[in-house]
Amino acid sequence: MAEQQELDSTFYDARALPAPVAEHWPQSGAELGELVAERVERDPPLVCVGAGLHLDPAALGERVFEVVRTEGCDRLLGLDQTSGIVRVEAGMRWRTLQEALAVDGFGLTHYALQCDEATIGGLLSRRHPMPRALFGGDIREGVVALQAMTPGSPYRYLPAPRKSSGPDMRYLFMGGQGAVGVILDVSLVCWPLQGSSAWSIAAPKLWDALEAWRWIMSQGIRTSWSHWSSESGRLMVATHLPSIVRAVQDREAARHFKDRLELVEGGQVEQLRVGLERQLPDRRLDEHASMTTRAVLGLEALATACERLDASDSSALVVTPFGDHSVTLYVRDADEVARDKTRAWLGHVALWAEPILGTGAQHWAPWSQQLKRQLDPHDTLAVGP
Amino acid sequence: MTRSTLARELAHHVGASHVLTSLPDRLAYNNDCWPRGVILTRGHVVRPHMPGAIVCPGDALEVQQLIQWARRTQTPLVPYGAGSGVCGGGVTDGHGVILDVKRLKALKEVSRDDLLIRAQSGVIGMNLEQELQRQGLTLGHFPSSLLCSSLGGYLAARSAGQYSSRYGKIEDMVASMSVVTGRAELMETAPDPLSSRGGQLDCPDLTQLFVGSEGTLGVICEATLNVQPQPTKRYYRGFQFDGVDEALDAMRVMMQQGLRPAVVRLYDAFDTIIARRGKSSSKQAPGASRMDKLRGLLPEGMVHRVAQWFDDYGEPADALRGQVQDRVEQVTRGLMGRVMGQPLILNKMIDALPDECLLIVGFEGDGIACEAEAEHAFELLRHRGLDLGQAPGEHWLHNRYNVSYKQSAMYAAGAFVDTMEVSTTWENLRNLYWSVRRALSPHVLVMAHFSHVYPEGCSIYFTFAGYAPTLEDTLERYELTWRTGLDAVAASGSSVAHHHGVGLSKAPWTEHDHPGGRSLFESLKATFDPDGIMNPGKVYTSSRGDRG
């Protein structure tokens, strides 16, 4: 364990998070696990913080708590190049992992765009699910092994592409916000780096982007990532496939979109990704976070909402990713009045919607409360009812 | 509780016509498709898993009432779809009540714009798929049991269809479920994308915890699922490789290039011979099962020759015919015993066979991407193997539902047959294959195919057949086979269940797949089934709270 550092409240202030009463700095996943396992009942509860980009303070309730900073738990534990599986500790940053893998000719190319500074553990444990996509999309889809620690005991999901051996216990931790256990390390699918293409399609309005996306779906084209913003007025999609397949798709897209399409190839595709991930609004640190709302909408609901969204002068819009059935939309309003109207309205059209900077109490269903009592009877972990 | 009291109490909730207590009915629900159950049934041992009654609720409210009743009376309930599971997940302990959901069979809503459907759990897979295809859609879930399995069973057992590498597995398809927990509480596992707006995102994700729970946490009543447009293009082909290793490497490269074939099935050397013999043999009916083909290889094919003699020369007196057939059956069993009783020799002979193996690959979809991917994949495979053309792929496509549930011929000949589906990473795949073959070879005849491919690994589907002269010996050999096989899987660091679920069959090995998972499962049970009435003894060997 690293020596206790002086608690830096500016880290929490910048993220609109309450400051803890103490911090811990484990230097490995094993030390992180020991911290959780060795807590005694009278100790303040713990919450893991990586980059602190997605933790919802409402999940902490009114507790006095201590933070476990996971930056030191960031080792790359192994790379199985035959299977395309990388094992990393939960504190590894998303961008850092991509850079480390590139050295060995691998990448996380098929996953949707993620905040570059976010930790793997944070991305997995956050509550916000992305649209499911086979062999890509949400990084939860790529977890083939996981090690976690609950207050009572350790848990391991041994490596396998897939299991049908009972409830998928990974989901007590993935999407669990750290309420019943903390993720120590995971094994993620990664891909050998190969050629890629990206299409930058002129789409001034959200409606235009949706129409372009529907054409892409109709052609059976599978994208690695997708992004549209009202500021750029362009739909960006990338594909990572053999060059022969991409050539056919590129040709057909050029024929369909004509001069609306700009083709991006090679290393520029990766640079595009880096830039977009750096600017994603999905983070507490974003300068506009207090004015931004995140929502998931079905494609039909999005089509219905386009007119209102496109007409709004005060909102900046980002959609990433697009999926076969739904999208994740970010709406940034100019002021609190507009923001509150947006949130009220989105509550009626979106599958769910929440502010980037959560406010108010988090709802915990009775079963969730019961499960918390079962798995964390002594309130070792600060997140939860 | 007497049977009449049981029937009366159940009828109070669902109506008398939806409660079954007769002996034939209880015998019918004595087993799902678990081969161990078949062995017992053929040995006239039916008591261990015969239910006390079968009850068929008509809606979620009746399911709630039944679970409330079960809690009051501490009666185990076993949710039951179509009973096609092969792991004993749908059998009782001899005392419980089967809760058959087949009355919940409606396709309630179809949204073409969002590509979502809402269906009840008792709908049979083929019926659902036919209705969707009539509307130009597909769920994309095609297990070999499609004609006799239910949506609820798919979800409860965490199943995967033959096209999983294109459309995903059932957990990829489900968006939300309506379940009645073991507390008799009706709840949605996630905001329903068809109807929910502005919902709460609870955590953790209940959908993925209930999928695969095999009825141990509650009863799945309905589900909202993702669907796809029905494909308009299909490209199927067969390739021959000099050996399994070469073929597996080609499959790995194909998947890691980002291609997404609908079907990838590699048969090992012996399974390749079986598959080809069935295709080329004029004596076999088109689409004859692999087990029929296996039987045809054995000397007990004389049964067919005797029948042919009768047909050619006219029917002798019934008594004579009966005596001849009885004698033929005796001889058949004796020959089966001699042949199948030496599996180690058989397997060593198989290992000496040429290593050539057959790979079936298929792509389907719409638009430009499908054809482009197929062409590239086929070209990649041509560089590593021999292109056999469309015929093998087309043959598989048209006969893929003729394989399962034709095992009765083997059982009739005194043998048993079962399957074991496991999975691991590409790095570990060869180790897994040979570990299991070595473990099983002394006990049963073994063949395998590789399917359900991923960028990171693959599933292996072992089929094995064995024989023993008596019921007791058969059970002993059967259980020894499973013990040594799954111990080998566990020792190789692989997963003991890819898509059949766990049930009773693999419950002692669940802990291997999830070290430390039992306590988590106990917590889920305490949360959703505090009285332990929901399908006790499944998934994990009897947990503390189970009643049974």
Image: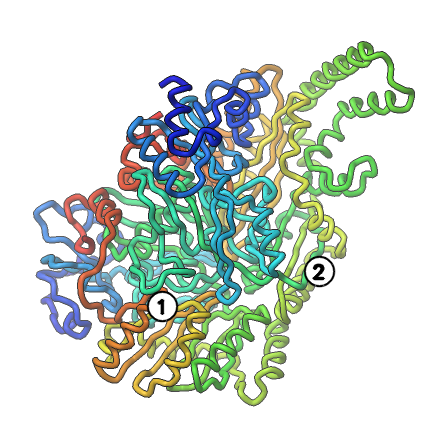
Q: Quadrant of the rendered structure where residue B472 is?
A: top right
Label 1 neighbour load within 10 Å: few <14, some 14-19, many 20+: many
Tell which of B53 and A208 is nearer to you: B53
Residue at the right extreme, as displayed: B313
The residue identified by callout 1 is: A350
The residue identified by callout 2 is: B382
Tell which of B196 and A273 is nearer to you: B196
Label 1's element?
loop
Percent x, y of residue B210: 38, 46
Q: Quadrant of the rendered structure where residue B379 is?
A: bottom right
Q: Compared with residue B49, is residue A285 higher up or lower down, i.e. above or below?
A: below
Instruction: Give the amino acid at mark 1.
Output: Ala
**Chain of the residue that carries numbered disc 1 in the rendered image:** A
Using the numbered discs, state the Cα–Cα distance from disc 1 to disc 2 in whole angstroms.
48 Å
Percent x, y of residue B279: 77, 43
**Chain of the residue that carries numbered disc 2 in the rendered image:** B
Instruction: Give the amino acid at mark 2.
Output: Arg
Q: Compared with residue B208, is residue B351 higher up or lower down, i.e. above or below?
A: above
Q: Which residue occupies 50% across, 83% down? A: A201
